[in-house]
């Protein structure tokens, strides 16, 4: 039986142990790394995935999932999984209206999937638990990109094993580029930086510890923070403004990002793409699966740290500590050069303001999250829970009836948050979203429009993106139907290869 005692992080390349700053009943310590971390490792930048054009004009990517090792801390290397490398995967880039083909080969010792998180795709191309890729085989989904510029990501989605596969390192970014050149930092790896944040929990032998503690119910919560797979990372910055594409790719941990000197920054994008206009703010909180694009302004020669402050989870102080919400963690140091290249001021307008006509929704539905179930039902891969009509807009009410942190992710669509407990969403939640946090005791209303694709026999998912909660059954399935169609009968799984 594993207790919830805090495990001290072993130092690596100058990283000291995490200090225990408090306890609940002697069982749990809040973690703090403030001004303790020595940022001694240059931030790794995931390479851009190579692509080619086939005879049909499609942009073709080749991905291969396989086992590898990473040296996260001194001693034995950690056994990991990666895509086109030992850990994480390359960044895919494409533009709106492009057709892509992605060949995904599985050279892992077990079956997996690869889901395009935030992407509007046909259900058979979604990479959910029905698109199984058997070991030694290749899955080749293809689709046309029909959404605005955005920072999306990809990760496995095997039924009941998503947490394990993501913790092993299978994840990467998929960037949809702007059609028109905006005055935003856009040089990948120079002033436009992917920031994939994950926490890891290692055993004494440096191997991944995936045992689920008996207290807390949050799943794997690690004490080793990595960015793009780098421990104690720093980034050399050579321009006045730098764009950070923040991705919470952790299994369970929430991050409340801000700068250590509390300077403001510009929030320019969320899950589904650019906001209508930049928002000047000091904090942006991301639950697992959420993304945010921020632009930070630097002065020559200075060093400033990207930090995660205490998260506002809306739970009691004991559960807050069990869920890591009380932790304060230094994430990444930005090191400005003595002379910085000029950057143009940010545009006053970034994108069209999101709009959906919700005056006459085709349906109103309620989804209640409790006891690792949705509406009292645990996930059944052979059951279709909801059928929605193509070219309609619906309003979904999502309620967290638990005392545990849950968020809510919907495949295929980007939605708008209409209200939280009857009030308007925070300004940073007014853009297109595919994942959002639902505090315990809270009810949120979202508007979703279903377009382009129908398939009565292949579902999309909706679920909590705290991955252990998802694996325990907090997930359901919906299909998009055309005129005269009715939900079909699902196989338990569909294997490729």
Image (spheres, grey):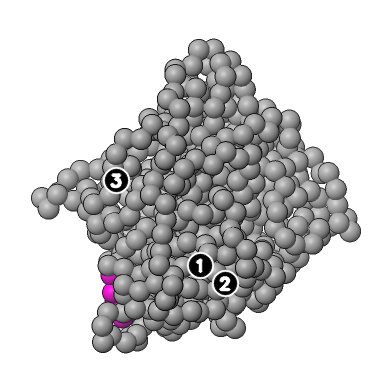
Q: Looking at the image, tell me whether mark 2 or mark 3 is earlier in sequence order.
A: 3
**In the orientation shown, which residue stands out farthest toward the front?**
359
Q: Residue at x 64, y 76 (%)?
A: 370
> x%, y% of residue 461?
44, 71
The residue where tag 1 is placed is 446
Specify few, some or many for label 1: CA neighbours under 10 Å numbering under 14, 14-19, or 20 or more: some
- Furthest-right residue in this view: 25
Q: Which residues are magenta?
A: 453-457
Query: Marks 1/3: CA distance?
Result: 28 Å
Q: Residue at x 27, y 49 (%)?
A: 96
Say if the magenta span includes residue 245: no
Callout 1 touching callout 2 (CB < 8 Å): yes
Q: In which quadrant of the rendered image does the C terminus lie?
A: bottom left
Mark 2 — residue? 398
- The answer to whether one can see residue 203 in this image is no
Q: Which residue is mark 3?
A: 94
Chain-order first, disc 1 or disc 3: 3
């Amino acid at each position: 039986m594993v207790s919830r005692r805090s495990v001290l992080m072993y130092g690596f390349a100058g990283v000291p142990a995490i200090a225990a700053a408090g306890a609940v009943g002697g069982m749990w310590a809040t973690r703090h790394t403030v001004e303790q971390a020595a940022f001694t490792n240059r931030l790794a930048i995931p390479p851009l995935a190579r692509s080619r054009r086939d005879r049909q004009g499609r942009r073709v990517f080749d991905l291969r999932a396989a086992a590898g090792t990473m040296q996260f801390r001194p001693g034995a290397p950690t056994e990991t999984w990666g895509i086109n490398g030992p850990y994480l995967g390359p960044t895919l880039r494409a533009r709106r209206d492009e057709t892509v083909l992605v060949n995904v080969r599985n050279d892992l010792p077990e079956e997996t999937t690869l889901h395009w998180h935030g992407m509007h795709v046909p259900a058979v191309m979604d990479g959910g638990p029905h698109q199984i890729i058997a070991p030694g085989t290749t899955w080749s989904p293809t689709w046309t990109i029909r959404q605005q510029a955005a920072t999306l990501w990809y990760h496995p989605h095997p039924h009941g094993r998503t947490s394990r596969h993501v913790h092993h390192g299978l994840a990467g970014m998929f960037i949809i580029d702007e059609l028109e050149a905006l005055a935003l930092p856009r040089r990948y790896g120079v002033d436009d930086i992917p920031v994939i944040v994950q926490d890891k929990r290692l055993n004494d032998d440096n191997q991944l510890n995936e045992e689920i503690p008996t207290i807390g119910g949050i799943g794997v919560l690690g004490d080793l923070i990595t960015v793009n797979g780098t421990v104690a990372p720093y980034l050399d910055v050579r321009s006045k403004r730098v764009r950070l594409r923040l991705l919470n790719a952790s299994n369970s941990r929430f991050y409340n990002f801000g700068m250590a000197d509390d300077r403001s920054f510009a929030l320019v994008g969320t899950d589904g793409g650019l906001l209508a206009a930049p928002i000047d703010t000091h904090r942006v909180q991301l639950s697992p699966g959420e993304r945010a694009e921020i632009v930070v302004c630097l002065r020559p020669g200075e060093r400033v740290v990207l930090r995660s402050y205490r998260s506002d989870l809306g739970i009691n102080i004991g559960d807050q500590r069990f869920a890591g919400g009380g932790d304060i963690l230094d994430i990444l140091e930005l090191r400005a050069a003595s002379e910085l290249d000029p950057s143009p001021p940010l545009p006053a307008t970034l994108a069209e303001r999101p709009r959906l006509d919700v005056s006459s929704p085709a349906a109103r539905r309620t989804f209640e999250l409790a006891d690792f179930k949705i509406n009292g039902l645990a996930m059944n891969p052979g059951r279709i829970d909801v059928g929605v009509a193509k070219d309609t807009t619906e309003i979904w009410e999502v309620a967290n009836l638990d005392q545990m942190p849950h968020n809510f992710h919907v495949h295929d669509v980007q939605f708008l948050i209409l209200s939280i407990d009857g009030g308007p969403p925070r300004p940073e939640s007014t853009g297109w979203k595919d994942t959002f946090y639902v505090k315990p005791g809270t009810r949120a209303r979202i508007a979703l429009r279903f377009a382009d694709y129908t398939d009565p026999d292949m579902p999309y998912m909706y679920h909590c993106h705290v991955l252990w909660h998802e694996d325990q059954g907090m997930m359901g399935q919906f299909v998009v139907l055309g005129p005269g169609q009715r939900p079909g009968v699902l196989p338990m799984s569909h294997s490729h290869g």
